[in-house]
Amino acid sequence: MPSERRLGQRRSAGLVLLLCLVTCGIWIFVWAYQNGDELNRWSGKGLGGGLHLVITILVSPVTMFLLAGEVEQLYRDDGQEPPITTLWGLWFLLPLIGNLIWYLRMQGAINDYWAAHGQRNNPGL
């Protein structure tokens, strides 16, 4: 168990999508780092933000499987049925719309997890 266990931040799906568009996709790297880091800090498992960033830069479809697997494991560790599984990473096979569906479900599952554990920040949009 990590020594510094802190809840992650709930994020606005709309705002993240807008930032991805405005920054021509660069915000995807920030998002992957932030979520990877927060999941690792909370659970003590997973790759952490730095490795998620490197993997997203080099082979971004792999991130879709890794993040889904880490979120799935968080739910399973709590004895809950996960809303997503590692297989959700297969959405990368459907260009653009698959990525959008994957992202919206992923962000929703992460936000719900943090809210269930007491995170009360308002993600906005």
Image (spheres, rainbow, N blue to C red):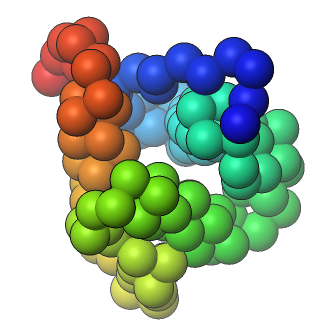
Q: In terms of image quadrants, where is residue 38? A: top right
- Number of numbered labels in the structure image: 0
In front of the other: 116 or 94 = 116
In front of the other: 52 or 99 = 52
Seen at 45% across and 85% down, the residue is 87
Q: Is residue 1 something that shows in the picture?
A: yes
**Image x and y of residue 121, in percent:** 26, 11
Q: Is residue 63 left or right of residue 86?
A: right
Q: Quadrant of the N terminus?
A: top right
Q: In terms of image quadrants, where is residue 117? A: top left
Seen at 24% across and 48% down, the residue is 108
In the rendered image of this protein, does residue 31 appear above or below residue 73? Answer: above
Q: Is residue 105 left or right of residue 57?
A: left
In front of the other: 38 or 79 = 79
Q: In terms of image quadrants, where is residue 5? A: top right
Residue found at the very far left of the displayed protein: 125
In the rendered image of this protein, does residue 48 appear above or below residue 68? Answer: above
Q: Quadrant of the C terminus?
A: top left
In the rendered image of this protein, does residue 5 appear above or below residue 38? Answer: above
**Image x and y of residue 88, in percent:** 40, 78
Seen at 23% across and 29% down, the residue is 115
Q: Is residue 15 something that shows in the picture?
A: no
Q: Is residue 76 left or right of residue 105?
A: right
